[in-house]
Image: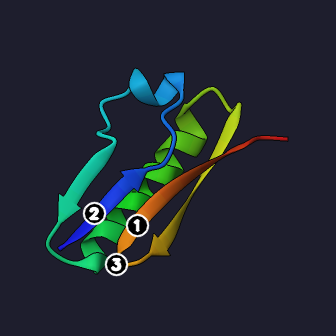
Amino acid sequence: MATVIVEKACGCFRNSDFEQETHFDTIEEALEKANEMCIIMNEDFCHKHKFRSEYVDGNVIIKMEMNG
């Protein structure tokens, strides 16, 4: 089992339909979902932050950085 965890939830994330923690049967499914989430968040959110996924200890962490 693998989990996608959003490390920090900004206002845009809290107002979205995404969950801060989502569980998957395989790491491949978790990586695919995390990458999809990052693309959507980077394209559709307010652009104050940049999101990227990182594999850490069997889970996928979505990290948030200030943009610019």
Q: Quadrant of the N terminus?
A: bottom left
Q: Quadrant of the C terminus?
A: top right
* Left or right of 14, for residue 64: right
10 Å neighbourhood of mark 1: few (<14), some, or many (≥20)? Answer: many
- Tell me the amino acid under the disc marked 3: Gly
Which one is in front, 42 or 66?
A: 66
Tell me the SS state at disc 2: strand
* Left or right of 51, for residue 14: left
- Distance Cα–Cα, label 1 vs label 2: 6 Å
Q: Are marks 3 and 1 in contact (CB under 8 Å)?
A: no
Q: Is residue 33 above or below residue 59?
A: above
- Distance Cα–Cα, label 3 vs label 2: 8 Å
x and y percent of residue 39 in the render?
Answer: 52, 52
Which one is in front, 26 or 47?
A: 26
Q: Are marks 1 and 2 in contact (CB under 8 Å)?
A: yes
Give the residue at x 40% y 59%: 34
x and y percent of residue 38 in the render?
Answer: 50, 52
- Tell me the amino acid under the disc marked 1: Val
Q: Of the numbered discs in the image, which one, if any, rests on residue 60? A: 1
Q: Which residue is mark 3?
A: 58
Please report whichever mark, 1 or 2, sits nearer to the chain's N-terminal start: 2
x and y percent of residue 3 in the render?
Answer: 28, 63
Q: Which residue is mark 2?
A: 3
- Tell me the amino acid under the disc marked 2: Thr
